[in-house]
Image (spheres, helix red, strand yellow):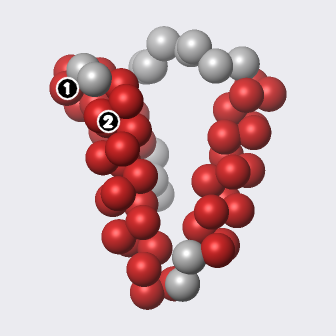
Amino acid sequence: MLPKILTNAQLEEVYDRIAEALDAVPAERRQLFLAKLALALANLLGDPAKVAQALEAAARDLD
């Protein structure tokens, strides 16, 4: 489990901004956009161990 740093309202705002950004990107470029976003956020986070935690959390319960 990742530590909770953002409030639910902040997470909802981030979710909405990501959804809007994805909608603005052509479907065939969305994977590239998401990869670039992930790398930009990882760089801002600045901690490879935390990036690994986030990857594990995101991969859980995808079914």
Give the vertical position of 31 relative to 13 (above or below). below
Instruction: Place residue 4 in its image quadrant.
Output: top right
Q: Is 12 drawn above or below residue 47 in the view shown?
A: below
**Residue at 35% from the left image edge and 70% from the top image edge:** 32
Residue 60 versus residue 12: which sits nearer the camera? 12
Q: Would residue 14 appear left or right of 53 to someone viewing this image?
A: right
Q: Which residue is mark 1?
A: 48
Q: Are marks 1 and 2 in contact (CB under 8 Å)?
A: yes
At 73% from the left and 50% from the top, the residue drawn is: 16
Query: In the rendered structure, which amino acid carries the disc numbered 1?
Result: Pro
Task: Write down the quadrant of residue 5 in the picture.
Answer: top right
- SS class of the residue under badge 2? helix
User: Is 22 left or right of 44, judged from the image as shown?
Assistant: right
Question: What mark, if any, has residue 5 been given in the picture?
Answer: none
* Residue extending furthest toward the left: 48
> x%, y% of residue 48?
19, 26
Asked if residue 53 shows in the view, the reply is no
- How far across and how far down the image is residue 35, in percent? 33, 59
- The residues tagged by marks 1 and 2 sit, at their Cα atoms, a distance apart of 8 Å
Q: Could you say whether the residue bearing mark 1 is in a helix, strand or loop?
A: helix
Quarter of the image for the N terminus: give it. top left
Residue at 69% in and 51% down: 17
Q: Amino acid at mark 2?
A: Ala
How far across and how far down the image is residue 52, in percent? 24, 31
Q: Which residue is mark 2?
A: 42
User: Which numbered disc, 1 or 2, marks the residue that appears first in the sequence?
Assistant: 2
Name the residue: 46% across, 73% down. Answer: 30
So how many labels did they put on this image? 2
